[in-house]
Amino acid sequence: MRRTLAAALLVLAALMLVTPAAFAAEGEALAGTVRDPDRKPVADIVITVKQGDKEVGEATTGADGTWSVELPGPGRYDVSLDVQSLPQGLVMRNKGGESLTDISVTEGQERNVLFPLTAPGQAGGADGGSGGPQADTGPGTGERFLQLLLEGVRFGAIIAITSVGLSLIFGTTRLVNFAHGEMVTLGAVIAWFLNVQGPGWHLLPAAALAVVAGVGIGGAIERGIWRPLRRRGVALIQMFIVSIGLALLIRHGVQVWFGATAQPYNDYQIQDRLTWGPLSITPRDLAIIGISFAVLFLVGLGLQRTRIGKAMRAVSDNRDLAESSGIDVSRVILYVWMLAGGLAALGGVFYGVSENVSFNMGFRLLLLMFASVILGGLGTAYGAIAGSLVVGIVAQVSTLWLPVELQNAWALVVLILVLLFRPQGILGRSERVG
């Protein structure tokens, strides 16, 4: 069962690798909002985008301070702000901050780029955060490897937060939830509404309420859709098709309401980078890593020590035996869906902070979530965490030698190689066939 499903999911993941662009209303782009120190938009600022020595496009900020340049495809780009177009009384906050180089853009992504401004006399000399990676001036291969390794850990932590719930759902119900990516999107969009368009809350309480909403959404989907289908004896393959339809419904419903353009949160966009030797990271990304591992530790502790956690593991190991032992399986499954919804929403907020919030962000992450779950071992939360870190690190580090548009492909190559020698995954258990 597990080997057959792993092979099916692997084929599905490979097909998804070439389809994200078909679901994106717009192609790749670089965009941003130029604001003054008081966070007021600055108009008529000229932004130029180049790829190597070739100019890709030029944009001028509008009255709301926003700008956008469409790109010919995935790759690495250089972005520069024309300091001559800055109004009197504003300069770059960081020395050399008007030129950002080596910004990677993946397929279907609209990457947010920021240019921090300040008043004359207050400019600093440290490198500032740009909302995306910046290349150092002539870093060695070893230094770039360490930096990409750190970025891979950050990316892997986000994937882990989102994929643990996907793995637990499969472990307890044997359902491949194709709509799990949309639960990630909903968490990010709810936080964005509370932070940007709605009451204007700070991102922290907005994220907390988004997680609560994710818990409720996960429970509602289980009680309203999956439990009735299980009671009627609907086959798993039919439920899988239902999950695809649910994913399409949510994704395009969000697109109609949210729009096709990616949007940033109001908070934690402009930050100075912390530097330790060859490594640099924004406080925002450092907090994402720390909070992610803290949450994953608490989830693991809950699975090991709490009564409901032990019940989840029992149902995942052998549902029939768990039910005969007096465990309320339906209640356990409901808690699994609620936990999965909350974790997916939290991961969505983290992903939106690192990148931008978009209607198809969960779908773009779903490929890597599937790869992580299969690589780590189907149905095990700890395997999903291990697989996520491997996938995140490989995806980022591979860009040191290979084009950025192939980073997800190399993560799948590692998945295939591991399964060839260990079909059950890193932490999965081998099963007898026949």
Image (tube, rainbow, N blue to C red):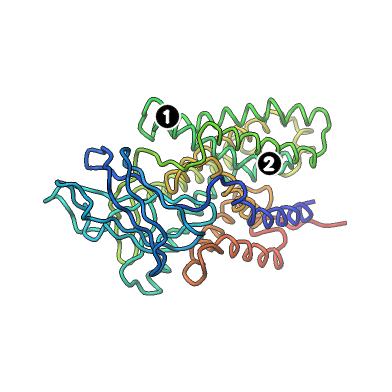
What's the residue at 38%, 25% (across, down)? 199
The x and y percentages for residue 304 are 59, 42
The residue wearing badge 1 is 194
User: Picture coordinates of residue 386 (x, y %)?
Assistant: 57, 56
For marks 2 and 1 on the same chain, the one whose residue lies earlier in the sequence: 2
Label 1, residues with CA under 10 Å away: few <14, some 14-19, many ≥20 = many
Give how far across and how far down residue 170 sits, in percent.
69, 43
The front one of 380 and 3 is 3
Tell me: residue 423, above or below residue 227. below
> Residue 429 is drawn in which quadrant?
bottom right
In the rendered image, which residue does mark 2 sit on? 177
Give the residue type that dot 2 points to. Asn
Q: Residues within 10 Å of mark 2 (few under 14, many from 20)?
A: many
Q: Is residue 357 above or below residue 386?
A: above
Quadrant in the picture for the C terminus? bottom right
Q: SS of the residue at dot 2?
A: loop
Callout 2 touching callout 1 (CB < 8 Å): no
Q: Tell me what residue is drawn at x 73 percent, y 41 percent.
A: 175
Residue found at the far right of this picture: 434
Count of numbered circles in the view: 2
What label does residue 266 carry, if any? none
Q: Position of residue 235 (x, y in %)?
A: 82, 38
Q: CA distance from mark 2 to mark 1?
A: 27 Å
Foreground tag (2 vs 1) = 1
Q: Amino acid at mark 1?
A: Leu
Q: Secondary structure at mark 1?
A: helix
Q: Is residue 216 left or right of residue 62?
A: right
13 over 252 or under it: above or below: below
Residue 132 is left or right of residue 89, and the answer is right
